[in-house]
Structure formats: C-alpha cells, structure tokens
Image (tube, helix red, strand yellow):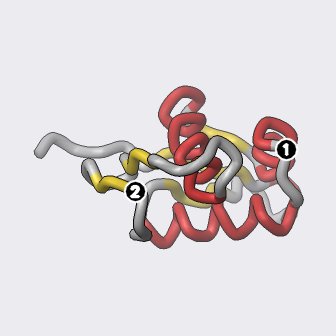
C-alpha cells in the first residue's frame, strides 16, 4: 500500500489521491465489483476509460489480493469473467 491510501480491511482501500490516479481507479474497480459482483475485462476498460493492458493489471492485482476470482464457464478463452469473492463472517 502506497502513501496516500488508508487500509480499511481486505478489498476496501480508501484513496486520498487525485481522481485519475491509479490508486483511485483501482478503488473504483473494487467498488464496481462490490456493486455488480461480476465484470468482464472489456466492461472494466469501458467503465474506467483505461487500456486493456491496464485493466488486466488491475484485475490481476485484485486476484492476487483475493478480492476477485476468474471464472471460466467453458474452455473458450473469451468466455471468462471476474467475480467478487464473497467474504465470510468475521
């Protein structure tokens, strides 16, 4: 976690940076997942106005944090999406 961010629990960072900073966009992505529960990479690109590579990096980071998981409903690579990991009580 960098300077300017306050950790408030798993998958819940609050950024104090400028509106278009990478930390702010990553927080917006977390909020989108809490609201919609599942998103595709093209949806993330469109909503946040970022490049596909940047969207992939943000999604990879959220997966590493355990906030989201990649769902592959079939063997076709373009059918996958990302889903919020449901938090248990505690």
Q: Residue furthest left?
A: 90
Q: Nearer the viewer, residue 2 or 83?
A: 2
Q: What residue sits 69% from the left and 41% below the top?
A: 39
Q: In this view, does 6 lie to the left or right of 38?
A: left
Q: Is mark 1 on a helix, strand or loop?
A: loop
Name the element at disc 2: strand
Q: Where is residue 22 in the image (x, y as percent from the top left)?
A: 65, 58
Q: Name the residue under label 2.
A: 5
Estimate the x, y position of residue 71 in percent, counting from the top left.
63, 55
From the image, state whether disc 1 or disc 2 is nearer to you: 2
Which image quadrant for residue 38?
A: top right
In front of the other: 28 or 65 = 28
Instruction: Give how far apart the Cα atoms at labels 1 and 2 are.
Output: 22 Å
Horizontal relation, residue 33 to residue 87: left or right: right
Residue drawn 45% across the image and 47% down it = 16
Q: Which residue lies furthest to the top in this view?
A: 35
Q: Kindly identify which numbered label has been placed on residue 89.
A: none
The residue carrying pointer 2 sits among few (fewer than 14), some (14 to 19) or many (20 or more) residues within 10 Å by Cα, namely some
Give the side of residue 73 with respect to residue 17, left or right. Answer: right
Is 6 left or right of 31, judged from the image as shown?
left
Q: How crowded is mark 1: few (under 14 residues within 10 Å), some or many (20 or more)?
A: few
In the depicted structure, whether residue 74 falls above or below residue 65: above
The quadrant holding residue 87 is top left
Which of the image's four quarters has the N terminus? bottom left
Which of 60/19 is in front?
19
- First of labels 1, 2 by sequence position: 2
Please give the residue where the numbered disc 1 appears in the rendered image.
49
Q: Residue 89 falls in which quadrant of the image?
A: top left
Instruction: From the viewer's side, name the closer residue of 44 and 76.
Output: 44
Give x and y (percent) for residue 23: 56, 56
Q: Where is residue 6 in the image (x, y as percent from the top left)?
A: 32, 53
């Amino acid at each position: 976690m960098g300077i300017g961010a306050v950790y408030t629990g798993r998958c819940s960072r609050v950024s104090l940076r400028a509106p278009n900073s990478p930390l702010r966009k990553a927080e917006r992505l977390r909020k989108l997942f809490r609201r919609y529960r599942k998103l595709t990479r093209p949806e993330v690109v469109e909503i946040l106005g970022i490049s596909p590579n940047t969207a992939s990096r943000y999604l990879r980071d959220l997966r590493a944090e355990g906030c989201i998981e990649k769902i592959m409903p079939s063997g076709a690579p373009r059918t996958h999406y990302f889903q919020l990991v449901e938090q248990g009580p505690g």
